[in-house]
């Protein structure tokens, strides 16, 4: 079995402590307009043909390829 060469940080090291449910609710409330605009823009781009729907098979293939590549290192 391969041993890790360096410690893998947990999410707290990268993103800070997990937010409480109240903090998450407050964040969504503060950012509601921006989030809704982002969703609306994505829907417009999809309707205008500027974006393509996700292809699950392609995504899974990419993930398998990445997994195999990382498994060999």
Image (spheres, rainbow, N blue to C red):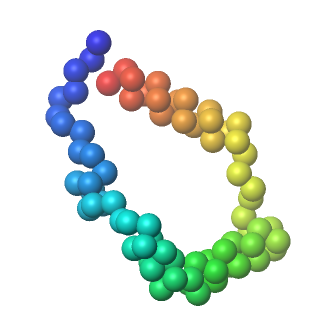
Image location (x, y in percent) of residue 9: 23, 45
Q: Is residue 2 above or below residue 28?
A: above
Q: Position of residue 15 (x, y in %)?
A: 30, 60
59 shown above or below 52: above
Quarter containing the N terminus: top left
Residue lying farthest left? 6
Residue depicted at x 54% and y 36%? 63
Q: Give 14 or 42, whichever is nearer the viewer.
A: 14
Residue 26 seen: yes
Q: In the rendered image, is residue 31 in sight?
A: no
User: In the depicted view, which residue is nearer to us: 8 or 24?
Assistant: 24
**Residue 58 percent location from the top left of the image:** 67, 39
In the displayed structure, does residue 61 sit left or right of residue 23? right
Could you say which quadrant of the image residue 45 lies in? Answer: bottom right
Q: Residue furthest front?
A: 22
Which percent across, then down, holds residue 5? 18, 29
- The residue at 71%/51% (across/down) is 54
Eyeballing the image, is 8 above or below 36?
above
Residue at point 26%, 62% (across, down): 16
Total marks placed: 0
Q: In the displayed structure, does residue 52 sit left or right of residue 25?
A: right
């Amino acid at each position: 079995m391969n041993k890790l060469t360096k410690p893998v940080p947990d999410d707290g090291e990268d993103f800070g402590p997990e937010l409480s449910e109240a903090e998450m609710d407050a964040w969504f409330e503060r950012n509601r307009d921006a989030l809704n605009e982002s969703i609306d823009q994505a829907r417009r781009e999809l309707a205008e043909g500027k974006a393509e729907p996700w292809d699950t098979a392609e995504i899974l293939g990419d993930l398998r390829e990445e997994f195999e590549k990382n498994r060999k290192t």
